[in-house]
Image (cartoon, rainbow, N blue to C red):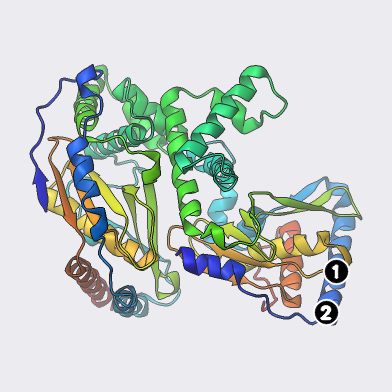
Amino acid sequence: MVLVAPRIRHPAGPPGPADRGAGSDVLALLRGDTSARPRFDPGLAGGLRAWLEDAAYEVVAARGEHAPALFLGPRQLLGSPSERNEQGGGEHLSGEVVLSRLVHALFRQLVHTGEIDDPLGDALEALRAGDGEAVLRHVESLPSSSRSALAEAVASHAATLRSQVPRFAPGWMPRTDDRVATPLAGGRVVLHGVFDLIVGLPQPGTASLCALGLATGGPWAWHRRSLHYLALLETLRSSTPPFRLALLESTTGRCGVEDVREEHLRAIASHIAAWLTRQAAANE
Amino acid sequence: MSDRLTGELVAPLPAVDAASWLAALADAKSMLANLAVRRGATGPFRVTDHDVRATLGGEAGDRAGREPFAWSTRTARRSLGLAAVRMLVAGRARSPVEGVQARLAESSLWVREGSSSASQLDRWLAGLPSAALAAVGAEAVTWATRLWCALDWSAFAAPPVVGRDRWWDSPHSALLALRGRADVRTARSHLVVLSGPRRTSVRAELALVILVESLRARGGAVPGRVVGWWPDSGQVVRVDPEPAVLTLGAEAVALVLAGARAPVRSAA
């Protein structure tokens, strides 16, 4: 993975004129050499799916035909980095989850409009229009000192985003929160995840999409594996993986980019198959 | 995905035996006429694919049926996304981002000027702060981009109709109406964008589209096929027009009106 040195951190608050158009080095890395988009073996997706289907049917056989569907995301399959309760819908929202949801809302806003005015206020308004009720309740229940600390933390992440997230031309087809799901064993096991950002137009037989993940905390290696997991799900969805993955850490501004290779997909498929086999053994 | 999904929409339709089709259509009309009369005293009833899912969909249907409707990023994305794709097809926008932004601007203008075109969605959007509006726009852009990129739009002989729901009003009672929802309509097919998990009720949901098309058609004409597509997984389910599908659709309507939670009998 190619790493880009973090930029000098900007103080929290609205960006000055020098900040406009930031993220150009990230943009260049995402673009790469457009003439060198890799082609993947058209049988790869089928082979990976067959491997996972076999493991999924072992789980179904062990759990019983009529057990409820098993929904598995990166936190179950790869272990939780530090953030508990990914969906944020329960009673046990951790500070990390709340911060993550708020920063992701700002990331989305930045990609879509290019602007963030009031980091905490904007993030809360975005969640209010969506499915962020649990996060809203959590923030509203905080004492003022904790809320101020949260506002400072969110502003710090927002400053990194402003300096590192490029402005994408509409022709790049940028889309955020692209959900991907792979039903296995007739839908009784479902692998799912969410791309924070995808750019590019799908082209049959050619890897042409680029995915960017946003990490707001937790180990870099975990987030990188999580991107490999999403690349696998994209391969199963469209038969072609993204050609490039980028990871941006909003705490530090660290950014890394790597091309997707077959061995990434095989390694993560092997990990999931092994995980499912262990589940099957545990249920027997 | 674009080749596969487009292929499903442009593939030739299988031959349908005219006599069997007309007989099944007559049976479906008769069943609906009886339902309309029975429901008459209890007020208007509109049956949609959502109702079919809520009634027949098991676990997924239970969730669909429990949530009261409210505008949100999730519930607004289809309307805004379809408007954006419509602009793309007509050449009035060059990207989903442009299409969604144009639709949001239009919405704001209609509400400001008190236009009769302003809908409930437009009025909800007008009351949102800019950050919330950005979240709504971002969700719609993702929805529209997935649909726009999923099809080879140049493969259709004529520009498809994007996002026009069709209603059938019972001639036996003004109180009963059926809705056929499709997101893209071509001369021989209808594409329905699906969400949620794959479920046992999905064929009945799509059969409702064929039923509505058949009831609206003149002279018992056989409508096009219906293709359901889950953008999350890329999965496709195809329902071709055949007599058993009419029965399936009519039975699904009957079960919705009965408030029953029983499996649909038809094997279609």
- Distance, label 2 to label 1, CA atoms, is 9 Å
The residue labelled by disc 2 is: B18
Q: Is residue B201 visible?
A: no
Give SS at disc 1.
Answer: helix
| Foreground pick, B113 / A283 | B113
Label 2 crowd bin: few (<14), some (14–19), many (20+), radius 10 Å: some
The residue labelled by disc 1 is: B220
The answer to whether residue A163 is left or right of residue B7 is left
Q: Is the residue at mark 2 from the same chain as the one at mark 1?
A: yes
Give SS at disc 2.
Answer: helix
* Total count of labels: 2
Residue B262, compared with residue A61, is above or below; it is above
The answer to whether residue B44 is left or right of residue B191 is right
Expressed as whole percent of the image width and height from the top left, the position of residue A144 reads 26, 17
Q: Do the residues under discs 2 and 1 have CB atoms within 8 angstroms?
A: yes
Residue A22: quarter of image = top left
Q: Residue at x 82, y 62 (%)?
A: B215
The tag on residue B166 is none
Q: Residue at x 26, y 40 (%)?
A: A97
Residue B228, compared with residue A45, is above or below; it is above
Q: Amino acid at mark 2?
A: Ala
Q: Is residue B29 visible?
A: yes
The answer to whether residue B25 is left or right of residue A232 is right
